[in-house]
Image (cartoon, coloured by chain):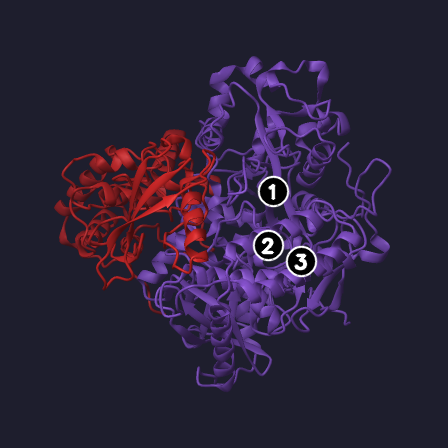
Chain colours: A purple, B red
Amino acid sequence: MSILDGKVPGGPIETKWSNYRVDMKLISPTNKRKLRVIVVGSGLAGASAAASLAELGYQVDCFCFQDSPRRAHSVAAQGGINAAKNYQNDGDSVRRLFYDTVKGGDFRAREANVYRLAEISNSIIDQCVAQGVPFARDYGGLLDNRSFGGAQVSRTFYARGQTGQQLLLGCYGALSRQIGLGKVQMHSRVEMLDLVVVEGKARGIITRHLVSGRIARWAADAVVLATGGYGNVFYLSTNAMGCNVTATYRAYKRGAYFANPCFTQIHPTCIPVAGEHQSKLTLMSESLRNDGRIWVPVQPDETRAAADIPEAERDYFLERKYPAFGNLAPRDISSRAAKEVCDEGRGVGKLGRGVYLDFSDALARLGKGSIAGRYGNLFEMYEKITGENPYQRPMRIYPASHYTMGGLWVDYNLMSNIEGLHVLGEANFSDHGANRLGASALMQGLADGYFIIGDTLGNYLGSAELAEVDINHAAFADAENSVRAGIKRLLEVNGRRSVDSFHRELGNIMWEYCGMSRNAQGLRKAIDLIAELREQFWREVRVPGTNESFNVALENAGRVADFLEFAQLLCYDALSRDESCGAHFREEHQTPEGEAERNDEAFSYVSAWQFTGVGSEPIQHKEPLSFDNVALATRSYK
Amino acid sequence: MKFTLCVWRQLNSDEPGSMVSYEVDGVSEDMSFLEVLDLLNENLVVRGEEPIAFDHDCREGICGMCALVINGVPHGPEPVTTACQLHMRKFTDGQTITVEPWRAAAFPVIRDLVVDRRSLDRVIQAGGFVSVNTGSAPDANALPISKDAADRAFEAAACIGCGACVAACPNASASLFVAAKVAQFAALPQGQPERLQRAIHLVEAMDREGFGGCTNHYECEAVCPKGIPVSFIAHLNRDFLKAALMSREVRDVPPAVEAEE
């Protein structure tokens, strides 16, 4: 074990970033043109980084597995993006956004990163508006805000329920402009399958073209990963079908440390699972909790329809347990409370895994018109999926895997322990601690891509000693051979089970033992079950077809094979963090009322794990966390 | 429920394709259309056959990746709904359902139901943006924009770039797609400096990519999963005409100008 240095600059927190920027190495425009940067991923973080780096003059290669960079899963974010503009004059400030984010993360994030994020938040809104992002406005023509996700100020900027889409289209526009100018080479339907490290520095990647199967080598002076999160380790999640851990996991296998993988966020308001066939879960915006009341029947195994259950036999459990925040309690707390009542046999819906989100009071109070004005599109979406009309009967919701706070370890420069490997957005671990607040993910992705990486990557490239390396270097041949061997192995198993059936089974294990609540015994069991399942996978999986074609089964097999290794790492981390904090709830550590009990004495650190071999326990490194600008407090939403 | 799916199978862009029939049993009405394809694929894989390739990703109607012509209609029978949000309760048990890829010269088939839509990206690269470098923006509230204008811009910006408009058009025109992008920026003050060039460059790029012209069939509007109205095409035509009548200086500005240091 070693102690990791987050390389946080000195000085007061308010001036760390601005002072640090002044001292950074600059690179002249003529020299920037000679430097090549690889950006993997084209979501908010990747596209904003690729565009901004190209504007600065670097040669950029950008990769995405979708058919177009505009489809990255940032597109699906609904709620909004936070910024400390204080346009509403309600007492917001950079400091308050910083404080809320650190507290929301249950004091497991790096203070200096969060402060910088809050500081940059305002520039993001300026940038997006200048690009023509159609944020909601009031009748005076100024930007509108709403309150969101446990905040007491209105700091969330939004574009109806499609904020992520509109922000991504802003980035996509900026990226498209640079592609048109020839400054970015865009490679769509191309997947990264390995990282190439030369003399301790990240110098390239190996990719597979998803249409032709061509394996290619790409050399560069630095590599930026913006490949999103690993929520699909649970199989069912709100993530897109293609979201995967492969890029970050394979970097981990090449020596990059993986930090806090057990910090996974479960979102309370998703449409419940309807049956065995389910392929993904759909989020219903958290904003519904502003007017919907959450309840379950008092009696277990209730068979009556919602409307037939009298008021006295309903349990509005969030209002009962958390009178101050009620139905607006934070995501982790609301999710656990829903699981609890379902575990007691009081869940609703065919499979008993759901709670009611009831709008009848709001409909009586405000009328159908005004509810339709606020949530019309969400009500329609709900009806499309479930066939039930939420104006007439309560919605059913249940928590689902949504976002992952953990990711590759990075220092203040967003560089991993491998020099030249930078990690942005959801793919890194840095800003959300143990729990992310609503409307903070978009903020972080864009802060990293637009406003941080341009500076810190320049500083790295300006000071690093970079040997001449091209794709003929032995390290490229080595990485390519290992990619080819992996593909060959998948194609040769020739068993009888589909890739999906393994993924589904893995998801069940993870949800059962490493989901909303966890305990040591269950985690140990999960580690063994995953190992067994992995062995079975390599004996029984069937991947038809060849490498040299558009082979969706093969693509998916590679991703699931990585999840089958990564899931164990997640469980090891959850086991070693013997405390409850944020979204990580260890049953052994709760107050008599069932609330999470944090242990700051023993666990005020980031766990960063080093790969030691498939199936063997990884080595833990620690980055101690100190809180000099906020007082450690117990999160209370009662 | 039980269905017969007639699916377009094509190995790659060089081989001819054909419709192949499959029986799918054990379908529940809660399943989405794509989940039925998943189920069929799982059966195929277990039998040692290659699964049907189809594009999909978010499965919540926003990424624009799914692209199926179902019973002859892009995205299927439900109005304002992407194929991924279409559920089997909208079909009748025992029905035969045909599934085909988008068909347009500008969208060559890659495999089975997957087509290459990079032509749409290239149209955007020709000018479907506001040219603003990172870091140079003024305060976001420095420029008030009327709520009407912002709402109109939003309505146009809701396009998910799926290409259903092209697949539905007898001319395989991308006019609705181009018009939506042009209208978004035309509604906003940020879009004004490049407004006329944008109209010209996008329409020229559309022609270059092999999309047809608009002859007012309105099929695009009928299938658009985001309900984008054809009235935007009228806006596009107005801007295009105005730009065409302007002096050569306006017309001949290259797609983008970058100052060399």
Q: Are marks 3 and 2 on the same chain?
A: yes
The span from disc 1 to disc 3 (Cα, nearest Å) is 17 Å
Q: Residues within 10 Å of mark 1 (few under 14, many from 20)?
A: many
Please tell me how crowded label 2 is: few (under 14), some (14-19), or many (20+) other residues with Cα within 10 Å.
many
**Are the residues tagged 2 and 1 within 8 Å (C-beta)?**
no
Q: Quadrant of the N terminus of chain A?
A: bottom right
- The chain ID associated with circle 2 is A
Compute the Cα span from label 3 to label 2.
Answer: 11 Å
**Reading the chain from its start, which is encountered first: label 2 or label 1?**
2
Residue drawn at 37 percent across, 29 percent down: B148
Regarding residue B37, the answer to whether it shows in the image is yes
The subunit letter for the residue under badge 3 reads: A
Q: Where does label 3 land, which residue? A: A261
User: Dividing the picture into quarters, in which one does residue B143 lie?
Assistant: top left
Residue at image point 38% right, 49% down: B65
Closest to the camera, between mark 3 and mark 2, is: 2
Give residue A400's mark: 1
| Residue closer to the observer: B210 or A154 | B210
Label 2 sits on what residue type? Val
The answer for which chain carries disc 1 is A
Q: Quadrant of the C terminus of chain A?
A: top right
Query: Which structural element holds mark 3?
Result: loop
Q: Nearer the viewer, mark 1 or mark 3?
A: 1
**Amino acid type shown at disc 1:** Ala
Q: Is residue A432 visible?
A: no
The kind of residue tagged 3 is Pro
Residue B98 vertical placement versus A610 (above, below)? above
CB contact under 8 Å: marks 1 and 3 = no
Tell me where residue A74 appears, x and y as whole percent.
Answer: 49, 49
Residue pointed to by mark 2: A233
Tell how many labels. Answer: 3
For label 1, the SS is: strand
